[in-house]
Image: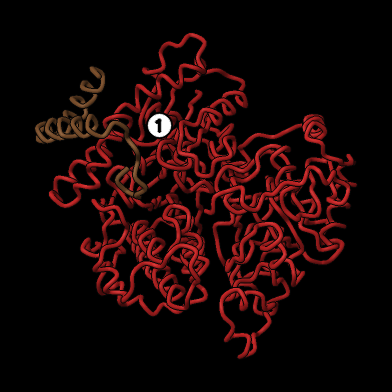
Chain colours: A brown, B red
């Protein structure tokens, strides 16, 4: 997890997308709740999002 | 320098090994796992590539993944943010997948790669990530025979780019233009694939095959409403007609309203309207690609064009760009889809990261005919076939070729399994089913007895490279079956008004030329030129067939049944042979005849694989 956070920081720095930090934080929290609520992650069959 | 390229986790996973700038091995995972379009980590393909190179993970200088997961995540987040609150359902499904799996792709890959390493160390340091379109562009330029070229890549979407233009010179490849998500020619085509009832990501070639039956009646409607195409070929899609950005379908209600009906249900009967829709999206795609090619040729003065990305598999459009003449020469990467990204990523690391010089191979491209997959020795073939219970005879090469020509003349469908397996979606005479193209029953027989489909697509011709101009309105090489051209006028048969009025498959079954099995209803054919330099045995076979019959062409279709990945091993070939009504199988120098086989080994293959 720590390496992922490091990667995210390096990425935001490289892309100059620090404005995404609050968005990512909130989405990760919401997403984390969804994961907890849902239990298993199943990829839906749609083309582009993934 | 040894570089392993990997593409995975979306569809068509693959691995490729580049040694000192030359491809040594490349294969798709689906061929090993027998799961069509397998998206999993390409463990088997990697194992094969390392074995073929005679090296282990610790001998590699770099391992390169074909795209950047974090940039994809960025697109995902920004798309949801831009469209919120719309797209919540999709968000709810997508985010857990990312949080549980996709964000951890790097540590996941390091863990998976460790199984190939004796030391288990230093893998993370070797791991690089190329951009999706950079991988496609590198796969199109570096193995091409051109010192200088425009490199055009088009697909559904990578990270952000859906279309990119790069200029390749020597070892340099510089991206000069991009079109970004959600504006995508690939996704426009996929939207019509979805709307006409086919499966997105695999049914696009069916839409292309269906197009010649229709009239492009909806072309103007598409240009007026869905896509704004500029004179230079750049484009903008009106997102109100689509639902792919944040929804769970490709098209929106507004799209249905514009075309006056909901999407066609899968496997329901095809109508003239579906054919007209296919013809229309094909015409729009060609229009965009032609405008783009003309503008790039004019604005840069460069005479060569390289292409890759899923849209470059549209061989009808490729043929039109070639005949349009804006570029003198065109080269398309045979593994133009995402599998080829594995090879491209390795090339990108070699030339752009390690700054190593590129190898040009004179007039020849660097793909070795795309025969980069596994092969089996004659002794191994005999051992494997014996173990599978096959009854076969072994021959000298000359005798095997004569017997194969006998079977071709007798009208048999022949499984032809020789040498190294092809890399890319096309069978090019290493894992092919072949037949006599002059036989008016061949098309019907191959469809119904072997492929178990009633296809509206004819089969492709393999023609000796030196004879292509005698049969087709095409003079240059097309070794990868990625160019469509018309059958020569003097070989065509004009259809009567009654025949013209026939519908669908009935129309296809009317002999329209000297080579009915490979001639589409618009007299076009998807040509593979066969070269003695890259596939000598296949060249010899067709030469022997020509010597006997005067015809330098055979029908070539992939060695599989519907929904099955192309065969990989002699055992796969034998199973497929026993599971369908193929009459003859030739594996290396072994010849198998159906009546000789043990009836107890017959398989019910018809419903074994999901429809594609």
Left of B13 or right of it: where is B599? right
Q: Is residue B97 visible?
A: yes
Question: Badge 1: how crowded within 10 Å, few (<14), some, or many (20+)?
Answer: many
Query: Residue at coordinates 56% horizontally, 25% vertically from top-left?
Result: B47
* Residue B75 percent location from the top left of the image: 23, 43
Q: Is residue B191 above or below residue B354?
A: below
Residue farthest along the top direction in this orientation: B119
Tell me which residue sits at (32%, 45%) in the image. B175
Q: Which subunit holds the residue at mark 1?
A: B
Where B232 falls versus B156 (above or below)? below
Residue nearest the observer in this picture, B97 or B46: B97
Q: Position of residue A27 (x, y in %)?
A: 15, 35
Q: Residue at x 33, y 69 (%)?
A: B262
Quarter of the rendering containing residue B501: bottom right
Q: Can residue B591 be spotted in the picture?
A: no
Residue B90 drawn at (x, y percent): 25, 47
> Number of marks in the image?
1
Give the residue drawn at x 80%, y 55%.
B583
Residue B349 quadrant: top left
Give residue B452's position: percent from left, percent from top. Answer: 64, 59
Residue B187 found in image quarter: bottom left
SS state under label 1: strand
Q: With B160 as the anchor, is B544 left or right in this view? A: right
Q: Which residue is mark 1?
A: B65
Q: Is residue B397 left or right of residue B123?
A: right
With B248 as the anchor, is B82 left or right in this view?
Answer: left
């Amino acid at each position: 997890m720590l390496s992922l956070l490091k990667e995210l920081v390096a990425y935001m720095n490289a892309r100059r997308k620090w404005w995404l930090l609050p968005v990512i934080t909130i989405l990760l929290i919401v997403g984390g709740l969804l994961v907890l609520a849902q239990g298993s992650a199943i990829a839906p069959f749609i083309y582009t999002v993934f | 320098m040894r570089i392993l390229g990997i593409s995975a986790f979306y569809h068509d996973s693959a691995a490729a090994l580049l040694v000192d700038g030359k491809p040594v091995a490349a294969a798709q995972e689906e061929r090993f796992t027998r799961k069509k379009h397998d998206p999993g980590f390409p463990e088997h393909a990697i194992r094969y590539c390392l074995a073929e190179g005679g090296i282990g993970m610790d001998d590699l200088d770099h391992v390169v993944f074909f795209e950047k997961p974090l940039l994809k995540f960025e697109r995902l987040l920004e798309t949801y943010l831009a469209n919120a609150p719309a797209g919540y359902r999709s968000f709810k499904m997508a985010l857990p997948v990312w949080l549980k799996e996709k964000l951890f792709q790097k540590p996941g890959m390091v863990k998976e790669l460790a199984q190939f390493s004796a030391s288990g160390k230093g893998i993370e340091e070797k791991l690089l990530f190329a951009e999706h379109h950079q991988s496609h562009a590198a796969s199109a330029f570096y193995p091409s025979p051109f010192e200088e070229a425009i490199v055009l890549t088009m697909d559904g979407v990578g990270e952000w780019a859906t279309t990119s233009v790069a200029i390749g010179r020597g070892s340099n490849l510089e991206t000069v233009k991009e079109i970004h998500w959600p504006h995508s020619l690939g996704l426009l085509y996929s939207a019509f694939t979805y709307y006409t009832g086919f499966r997105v990501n695999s049914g696009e070639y069916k839409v292309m095959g269906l197009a010649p039956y229709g009239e492009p009646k909806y072309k103007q409607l598409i240009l007026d409403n869905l896509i704004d195409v500029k004179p230079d070929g750049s484009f903008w899609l009106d997102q109100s007609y689509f639902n792919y950005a944040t929804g769970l379908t490709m098209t929106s209600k507004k799209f249905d309203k514009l075309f006056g009906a909901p999407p066609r249900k899968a496997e329901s009967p095809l109508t003239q309207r579906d054919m007209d829709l296919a013809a229309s999206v094909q015409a729009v795609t060609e229009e965009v690609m032609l405008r783009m090619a003309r503008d790039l040729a004019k604005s840069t003065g460069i005479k060569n064009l390289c292409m890759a990305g899923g849209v470059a598999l549209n061989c009808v459009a490729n043929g039109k760009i070639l005949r349009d003449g804006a570029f003198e020469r065109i080269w398309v990467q045979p593994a133009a889809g995402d599998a080829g990204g594995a090879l491209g990523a390795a090339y990108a690391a070699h030339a752009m990261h390690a700054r190593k010089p590129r190898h040009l191979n004179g007039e020849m491209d660097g793909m070795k005919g795309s025969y980069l997959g596994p092969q089996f020795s004659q002794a191994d073939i005999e051992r494997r076939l014996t173990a599978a219970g096959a009854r076969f005879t072994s021959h000298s090469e000359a005798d095997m070729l004569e017997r194969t020509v006998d079977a071709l003349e007798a009208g048999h469908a022949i499984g032809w399994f020789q040498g190294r397996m092809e890399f890319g979606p096309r069978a090019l005479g290493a894992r092919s089913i072949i037949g006599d193209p002059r036989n008016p029953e061949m098309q019907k027989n191959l469809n119904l007895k072997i492929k178990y489909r009633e296809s509206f697509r004819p089969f492709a011709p393999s023609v000796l490279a030196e004879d292509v101009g005698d049969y087709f309105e095409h003079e240059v090489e097309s070794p990868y079956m990625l160019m469509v051209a018309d059958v020569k006028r003097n070989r065509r048969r004009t259809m009567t008004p009654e025949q013209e009025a026939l519908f669908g498959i009935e129309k296809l079954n009317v002999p329209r030329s000297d080579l009915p099995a490979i001639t589409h209803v618009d007299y076009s054919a998807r040509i593979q030129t066969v070269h003695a330099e890259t596939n000598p045995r296949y060249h010899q076979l067709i030469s022997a067939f020509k010597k006997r019959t005067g015809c330098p062409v055979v029908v070539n279709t992939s060695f599989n049944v519907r929904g099955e990945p192309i065969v990989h091993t002699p055992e796969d070939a034998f199973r497929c042979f026993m599971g369908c009504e193929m009459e003859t199988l030739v594996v290396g120098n072994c010849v198998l005849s159906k009546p000789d086989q043990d009836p107890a080994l017959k398989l019910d293959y018809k419903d074994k694989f999901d429809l594609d």
